[in-house]
Image (cartoon, grey):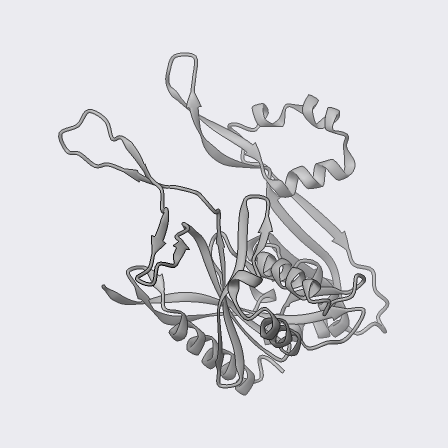
């Protein structure tokens, strides 16, 4: 086994409950105490299973790993052969494992893993490409609802915390416009053209499909033939919100409203324009950082990740970036 230390991105989230006021750490401890084994707390969403696989207490901070996988899925391999005319693809089914005691356990293909730590209503996360704060928020909502620790009308939000400089700018300058942009399409793959050549295919992004559906019927969207017309373009849609607040309204509260609303948007796709024309980019609206963690054969070492999350949060509290 090879252990390598790698840099990972950390993002801070402020936990909020609406319309009530609760503490996530306390609720989560209660839920995990009752659901004391992962097999008791599996969430099945379509073909994907989400589960908190590991739970640890690190210096009074509750830490865990959120795992996602598709039960029964196979692993695909490309067979490299320097003398072959083509590279074949082989599949391997994980199957089951029988222990020395005769107990059968299932081996599933891990899709992705996310690591988090929660102290009070402070949340720190090491995300992955497939598992981000949106999935963690959804899973925690499901988990607490299963244990009846959330009422039907209660909403759990993992909101962003702006950098100290961004918060100071917003509190001193009136926010006037919020812009959230997203690409019109994503390159999804290739298909064979009329002459047998590979042709790139494009699909509308999920955000754009949702946005268009809110204003146009499916028939109108279909008639636009956007997938055909956008093949060689690089368009994106931008949702622009004019933020009209009285000058007596607290800039602090205004920023909280904004960051809660755009908490799952990508940093590069968001910006706030103040009354003076100052532009605050999305990167400054999210408190992030870097930590170095041990990885074993490419897999994050969970205990070390939890320690690094704890130390990073402690440093942000000490310097006053988080209160």
Q: Nearer the viewer, residue 243 or 221?
A: 221
Give x and y (percent) for residue 45.
Answer: 60, 48
Residue 136 in view: yes
Give x and y (percent) for residue 285.
Answer: 61, 65
Q: Quadrant of residue 165?
A: bottom right
Q: Which residue is at a point 78% across and 37% down the rendered structure image?
A: 215
Which image quarter is the N terminus in?
bottom left
Give x and y (percent) for residue 207.
Answer: 64, 43
Q: Which residue is at a point 73% across and 67% down the rendered structure image?
A: 148
Furthest-front residue in this view: 102
Furthest-top residue in this view: 195
Q: Which residue is at a point 43% across and 17% down the rendered structure image?
A: 193
In this rendering, the answer to whether 292 lies above or below 298 is below
Q: Nearer the viewer, residue 36 or 183?
A: 36
Which image quarter is the C terminus in?
bottom right
Give x and y (percent) for residue 135.
Answer: 58, 56
Query: In the drawing, does residue 216 fall left or right of residue 73?
Result: right
Query: In the drawing, does residue 285 fall left or right of residue 195?
Result: right
């Amino acid at each position: 086994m090879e252990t390598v230390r790698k840099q990972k991105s950390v993002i801070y989230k402020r936990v909020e409950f609406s319309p009530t006021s609760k503490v996530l750490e306390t609720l989560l401890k209660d839920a995990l105490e009752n659901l004391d084994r992962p097999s008791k707390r599996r969430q099945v969403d379509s073909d994907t299973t989400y589960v908190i696989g590991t739970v640890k207490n690190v210096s009074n901070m509750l830490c865990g790993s959120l795992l996602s996988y598709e039960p029964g899925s196979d692993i695909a391999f490309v067979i490299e052969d320097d003398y072959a005319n083509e590279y074949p693809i082989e599949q391997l089914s994980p199957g089951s494992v029988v222990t020395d005691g005769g107990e059968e356990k299932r081996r599933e293909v891990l899709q992705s893993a996310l690591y988090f730590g929660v102290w009070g209503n402070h949340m720190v996360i090491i995300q992955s490409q497939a598992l981000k704060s949106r999935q963690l928020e959804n899973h925690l909502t499901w988990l607490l609802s299963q244990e009846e620790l959330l009422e039907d009308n209660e909403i759990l939000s993992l909101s962003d915390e702006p950098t100290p400089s961004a918060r100071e700018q917003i509190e001193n300058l009136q926010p006037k416009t919020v812009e959230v942009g997203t690409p019109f399409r994503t390159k999804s793959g290739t298909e064979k053209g009329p002459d047998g050549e590979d042709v790139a295919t494009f699909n509308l992004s999920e955000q754009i499909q949702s946005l268009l559906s809110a204003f146009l019927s499916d028939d109108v969207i279909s008639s636009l033939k956007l997938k055909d017309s956008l093949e060689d373009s690089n368009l994106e849609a931008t949702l622009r919100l004019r933020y009209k607040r009285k000058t007596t309204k607290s800039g602090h509260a205004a920023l909280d409203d904004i960051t809660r609303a755009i908490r799952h948007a990508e940093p590069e796709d968001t910006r706030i324009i103040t009354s003076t024309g100052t532009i605050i980019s999305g990167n400054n609206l999210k408190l992030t950082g870097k930590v170095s963690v041990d990885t074993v054969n490419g897999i994050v070492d969970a205990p070390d990740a939890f320690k690094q999350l704890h130390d990073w949060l402690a440093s942000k509290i000490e310097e006053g970036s988080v209160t």
